[in-house]
Amino acid sequence: MRKKKGKSAKRAQSSQGDVQELQAKQAPHSFVFHRGQVGKNVRHLVLDVRRIMEPYTAVKLKVRKKNVLKDFVNIAGVLNVTHFIVFTKSDVSTNMKLMRLPRGPTLTFKVHGYCFSRDVLSAQRRPNVELRQYQHHPLLVMNNFSGDGMHLKLMTTMFQNMFPSINVNKVKLDSIKRCVLIDYDQETKMIDLRHYNIRVVPTGMSRGIKKLIKSKLPDLGKYEDISEYVDKGGNLSESEAEMDGDFNKVTLPQKMTGRGNTKLSQSAIRLKEVGPRLKLQLVKIEEGICSGQVMFHEFVEKTSGDLKSLKKLREQKKLLKLKRKKEQAENVRKKQEAKEAHKAKSLAGMADAQETSKTEDVEKSASEVSEDDDAAYYEKEVGIAPDPDLFLNKKPHLKRKRKMSDNFPGKRFKKDKFDKTNRNKNVKGDKSSDKKFRGKPLKGDHSSKPGKRFKGDKSSGSHGNKMAKNKNEKHFQKDRSDPKKKFNKNRRDNDTDRPRKPGSKTFSGKRKERPPPRGKNSGKRKTSFKPKRNR
């Protein structure tokens, strides 16, 4: 079982984590993005520059069309972002702006040429694409930035502050895996930016021994002894041999990863380019973040009078901006006050309307009570005041029943029904025949069928009922004449002729024989022949 850590080990680990977190907060962070329509190539260049600035940059930063520079500035303070690298494209050239937050300055560079990382790696025989090298920040190396110009000093400090500083006494050599080289050419005033991978290889041994130290052993089948392989130098080709000299040999103060890289041993430092490449030219330096006085311009020179006039215009613009902001705040305040006043007025109007509606309802109910007062109505109709005990038990709020008119009968009118004998008749002048029968018309003679019958007028309906009664009596007599038959009052006359299902109580008669078959083979019986399967 694994041994648990003690308290001292846990404290040391927690304190180390706190130190690393503090270092990460103090390190400069950056945003790399583009503005405007730049094209596919510049977007790919933005991704490659983010690789250089790792791990203290937003690798998955997404930029939308509606985003403005102010949005990035507002969020930069929360994320400890100190630098912006912004790529833009015009009709003339591609530009790169380097900004220091939150107060500037802003350096504008013209991009004369660039090369992607994929193009650099594709030209190498064995490219190094190890992802662990991006876990630590790169080492910055600057060359030929010495000069008297203020723009050179400012440019130097800007580049230095983009990357974390290194303490030589406390730095771990294993954490230095990459290198960014920035070279300034004073004659052409061009800046070359390169990105390299750092590798340390042990020296002071022959080529064959170097090959043996590697994890992949060479083929020793053609040698009788290993000494023969060492004496012949491992039969390395000239392309495999790397030229090491005094210019890249160092003595390691610490032990580093890799076979043979022990403490106080001699090793050679080798650089392998990772990409991308950039060729820049400084165009101008201005105060603030893309807004302010131009401190330096490569192509335009202005006199002191022009600078003063520009400064005056800038101050006037600032004053005008402040004035507009004040006017806007005043307008917003007035609109808010008007809105509150309108709201209070509308609420007061609603309360008044409710009160008036209540008073109107009370008056209306009082008028209805006064109109429907029984005593007043009695005095109005009869002409004499009623006795005081007449309407004593009556409630004043109950409405009286209105008097029926003479034309409106007391009972509901009962509609006469037609007689079944006169349903299909349509005699002119006969009121009963003018009315249409709305029921389902009957087919045939249904006088013998029992059930409910229409009650017609006294003249016609009584005769029809008598006829039906006489027929039913004959039918009953006929049924009673046969003693074997059970008498069923609700059965119809033609029920005796209807065949019954076999098994029922009233079934009598023979089954119907099936008709003879028709066709050629009608008399023959159908047979199916299946040949036997051979097993």
Image (cartoon, rainbow, N blue to C red):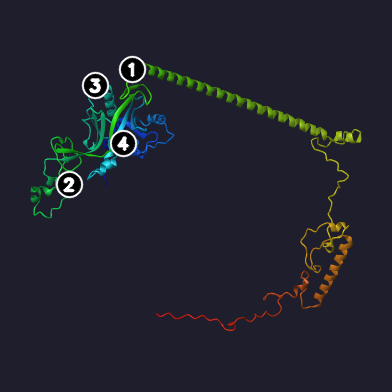
Say which label, 4 or 1, has the lower sequence index.
4
Where disc 2 sits, the SS reads: loop
Q: Residues within 10 Å of mark 1 (few under 14, many from 20)?
A: few
The residue singled out by tag 1 in the image is 303
Q: Position of residue 444 (x, y in %)?
A: 79, 68
Which mark's residue is nearer the viewer, 4 or 3? 3
Where disc 3 sits, the SS reads: loop
Which mark's residue is nearer the viewer, 4 or 1? 1
Name the amino acid, label 4.
Val
Q: Residue at point 11% right, 55% down? A: 222
Say which label, 4 or 3, has the lower sequence index.
4
Which numbered circle lies on residue 148? 3
Say which label, 2 or 1, has the lower sequence index.
2
Say which label, 1 or 3, has the lower sequence index.
3
Q: Position of residue 66 (x, y in %)?
A: 44, 34
Q: Quadrant of residue 140?
A: top left
Say which label, 3 or 2, has the lower sequence index.
3
Q: Mark 2 and mark 4: span between their CA atoms?
A: 33 Å
Q: Position of residue 20 (x, y in %)?
A: 29, 34
Name the amino acid, label 1.
Thr
Asked whether, in this view, residue 323 is left or right of residue 8, the answer is: right
Q: Mark 3 and mark 2: span between their CA atoms?
A: 50 Å
